[in-house]
Image (cartoon, rainbow, N blue to C red):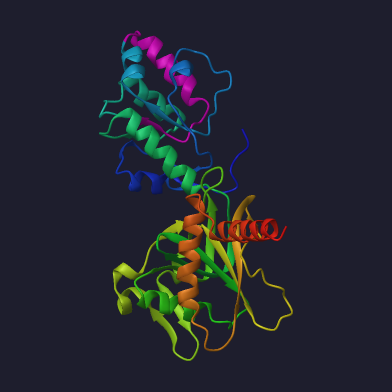
Amino acid sequence: MPMNSYSVRLKQVVEEFNLIVARESSDYDRIDLMVEEVMRPGLPLAGFFTHFEPLRLQVIGNAEATYLHSLTPERRAETFDRLFSYHIPALVFARNIEPMPECMQMAEKHDITILRCLESTSYVVSSLITYLKNALAPRITRHGVFVEVYGEGLLLMGESGIGKSEAAAELLKRGHRLIADDAVEIRKVAGNTLRGTSPELIRNYIEIRGIGVINVAKLFGMAAIKDESTVDLVVNIVPVGNEQIFDRLGLEEQYMDLLGVKVPAITIPVRPGRNLAIILEVAAMNNRQKKMGYNAAAEFTEQINRHFDETAGQSF
């Protein structure tokens, strides 16, 4: 299995899930998790290590614990000795299961971290996988402004100074939310799902030319910010007069490729005095309608074509 190009510290996962450290390895603070899968090592405990992935977190549940208790202490020690010889990042005991003495003995021998948690095994496994998929997801950073309008994540892109941040400020006054200004970190968390967020350093801040940097949470309230959102629509903002031909009806489908995902895109020409915030609200609602199966442009075109067909039939 190829390793992910990103990693997350085991210590961070322990703190996130309130795991109990039963034994801390000498390199505990430096252990990185680089694969998003989590494994219940039933077959390896029985001696079958073909296709075993040692980079995964290993989780012991009731089934594995019952099997281990059925073994003699000597056989149990041999089982943990072989498992830990693969230098797994950590072994997690779910359901508040007490680690066996042989487990702790072999963990000491191979310097392995042993963890415990109170939750059920299925909850621990599913939660860890979800967390790791998000933390290790492929990502890119794009210059722009990311806002959530009527539940739709709009990625505003365009040349510097065209008014993206000003439009975002107007949207905030209208009750919408800011996710990121200037730099947007986009992660591919599933097959065709992109999530956008802000780098930690500039989160909740927005820069408006002539005013400077403002803290959105303090100025507009906590309801005006959000940590992340799905990237639903890319809005390319361009100045009027750049010789670009625009689709007046909206029949032409535009897309932008982000991390291999085709995201719907539109191009909006702007000039001084044009209310961009209202246009973005309409764009968000229209994109939502399209996702629900309704396309106003297609319906309008069909009505026009039907009208001309009827008119042509009456002329004969």
Q: Is residue 52 above or below residue 213?
A: above
Picture coordinates of residue 148 (x, y %)? 43, 64
Number of residue marks: 0
Q: Residue at x 52, y 14 (%)?
A: 48
Picture coordinates of residue 174 (x, y %)? 36, 75
Q: Is residue 237 above or below residue 292?
A: below
Asked which quadrant contains residue 233, the reply is bottom right
Q: Is residue 107 above or below residue 247?
A: above
**Residue 295 visible in the snapshot:** yes
Asked which quadrant contains residue 313, the reply is bottom right
Q: Residue at x 41, y 24 (%)?
A: 106
Q: Residue at x 52, y 88 (%)?
A: 273
| Quarter in which the C terminus is drawn | bottom right
**Residue 230 visible in the snapshot:** no
Which residues lie in the magenta part? 70-93
> Which residue is farthest bottom?
210
Query: In the image, is residue 224 part of the stretch drawn in magenta?
Result: no
